Amino acid sequence: MPIPEVPRAASSPRRALIVLAVASVVGCSRGLSLPREMTWEGERLEKATSWSSQGVSGVVFVPPGESLPSASLQVGILASRKHASGAELHRWIMDQYRRSPTVQWYESATADEACKIGVTGNDTTVRPFVALHVCRAAGGVAGCAEVDRRLDDDEVGRCVSGASAGCEEICTLRWLEARASLEPILEGVLKH
């Protein structure tokens, strides 16, 4: 089923990083480390990938038996000593997202948090998503935690038919669900 393109609100930018949820050990030349394991809302997740680029290290976790890029849930963590604040790392993430090939339907962001709704895909997989991330800094390390979930058909319909109002409602509801789980993940990364 083709996913229709939704007009973005005037203030919403173009693209977002697919998932910046990280929770695996990623060694960095300056000794940054990320969790080796991840549990999200009681569900054990498996490490799908880890990486380092432009002074940022990241890891992404998905449910057992699933893989990127199609996993229904993707939780990631980023850490950087290069970025002086959570807001600075957040800007880097948003820049990467806006440059990505993601079809961007909606974006709502503050200085250190964002909700992004769009569609990722390739020749074999199309995945509508909502991704929420929060960024902070402590002890010379900036970090971000993100949860990215596949949108179901009802949510896609609400977002498409309601344009930015439907997407905004989805972001509001997802923030209520996810914020309490994202903050402790981020705190754990910043303590290392």
Image (cartoon, rainbow, N blue to C red):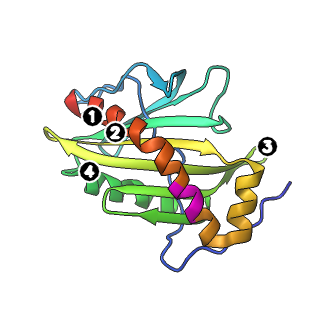
- The reply to whether the C-beta atoms of the residues labelled 2 and 1 are less than 8 Å apart is yes
Q: Amino acid at mark 2?
A: Glu
Distance between the alpha carbons at the discs numbered 3 and 4: 35 Å
Among numbered discs 2 and 4, the one appearing first in the sequence:
4
Q: Which label sits in the foreground, 1 or 3?
A: 1
- The secondary structure type at the circle numbered 4 is helix
- Can you give x and y, in whole percent of width and height, for residue 78 in the image? 36, 39
What residue appears at the point 66 percent right and 26 percent down from the top-left corner?
66
Residue at 47 percent across and 23 percent down: it is: 39
- Residue beneath disc 4: 86
Type of amino acid under label 3: Thr
Dot 4 or dot 1: first in sequence order is 4
Residue at the spot of label 1: 187
Q: Which mark is residue 117?
A: none
* Real-space CA distance between mark 4 and mark 1, rounded to the nearest whole angstrom: 12 Å
Lower position in the chain sequence, tag 1 or tag 3? 3
**Residue labelled with disc 2:** 183
Q: What main secondary structure does the magenta stretch of the protein show?
A: helix
